[in-house]
Image (cartoon, helix red, strand yellow):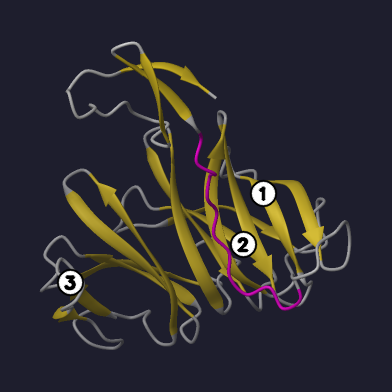
Amino acid sequence: MQLIDVSIPSSPTAVGSASDGSNGFTALAGACGVDVFVIGSSTYTIVASNDDNGVQLIDISTPSSPTAVGSASDGSNGFTMLNSPQDVDTFVIGSNTYAIVASRWGNGVQLIDVSTPSSPTAVGSASDDANGFTELYSPRGVNTFVVGSNTYAIVASYEDKGVQVIDVSIPSNPVAAGAANNDVGGFTALNGANSVDNFRSRQLQLRNCHGQQRESCAADRCERSADHHCSCDVLL
């Protein structure tokens, strides 16, 4: 794992690194996926390790000196879906922070409570062809998002040629919420689905600046206009 200072994008700088088998790092072989999260005043990363069949949790609060703080491996302590993990994402429910891991050879996902990074805890899992899950065969990518009061994950399934949407609002009980498959329902580019992300389209906002309506795409805030007087009126 390489840590890079990108404060000056035109001149990225190496600041730290970590390698499997040294300084307490036990689950970095074949590192495939990574995500960053914050607990209190510390910043951590969780790395999916394909060859080690597990995940490594690292304190990167001091980027020049990453520190191994915890790990988990498939087949131990309740972890059943960490066989050849390919990707990982983190999310927050209440006061707890969780990770969801896509397990290639497990044909499913593992839900992990990482609120205490030194002691990751298996809290839930889902597998292909069980409990309504139809698109989790050899998953390669995962991303989480929020709609209303619910938190969801979307998983890219390489072999199923599709995506699985999962309600992870209760991490101990992930629920199949929806799915899409290549060449069905208008989907034409899901063959070999390997990675996934999500985004929200920009919304148009009307502002009243001294009686004149002005348009902006900053839907979540009302920035000041050039004359420093601008109030948000309507969100379309």
Is 49 situated left or right of 191 in this image? left
Can you tell which mark lies on residue 166?
Answer: 1
Q: Which residues are magenta?
A: 191-203
Residue 79 seen in the current view: no
- Residue 112 located within the stretch drawn in magenta: no
Reading the image, the residue beneath label 3 is: 66
**Image quadrant of residue 156?**
bottom right
Q: Are marks 2 and 1 in contact (CB under 8 Å)?
A: yes
In the rendered structure, find residue 85 and report the number of the disc placed on it.
Answer: none
Going by the numbered disc 2, the residue's amino acid type is: Val
- Which residue of the protein is positioned furthest toward the right in this rendering? 184
Q: Is residue 199 magenta?
A: yes
The number of numbered badges drawn on the structure is: 3
Q: Position of residue 81 (x, y in %)?
A: 60, 67
Q: Position of residue 152 (x, y in %)?
A: 60, 45
The residue at the point 50 percent across, 41 percent down is: 202
Q: In the displayed structure, would residue 29 be above or below residue 41?
A: below
* Mark 1 burial class by Cα count in 10 Å: few <14, some 14-19, many 20+: many
- Between 97 and 32, which is closer to the camera in this rendering? 32
Q: Earlier in the sequence, mark 3 or mark 2?
A: 3
223 or 62, nearer to the observer: 223
**Residue type, mark 3 in image:** Pro
Quadrant placement of the N terminus: bottom left
Alpha carbon of mark 3 to alpha carbon of mark 2: how far?
Answer: 27 Å
Amino acid bearing label 1:
Ile
Is 172 above or below relative to 191?
Answer: above
Upstream in sequence: badge 1 or badge 3: 3
Q: Is residue 194 above or below residue 184?
A: below
For the question of whether residue 88 can be seen, the reply is yes
- The residue beneath circle 2 is 109
Q: Position of residue 131 (x, y in %)?
A: 80, 51
Residue most extreme to the top: 211
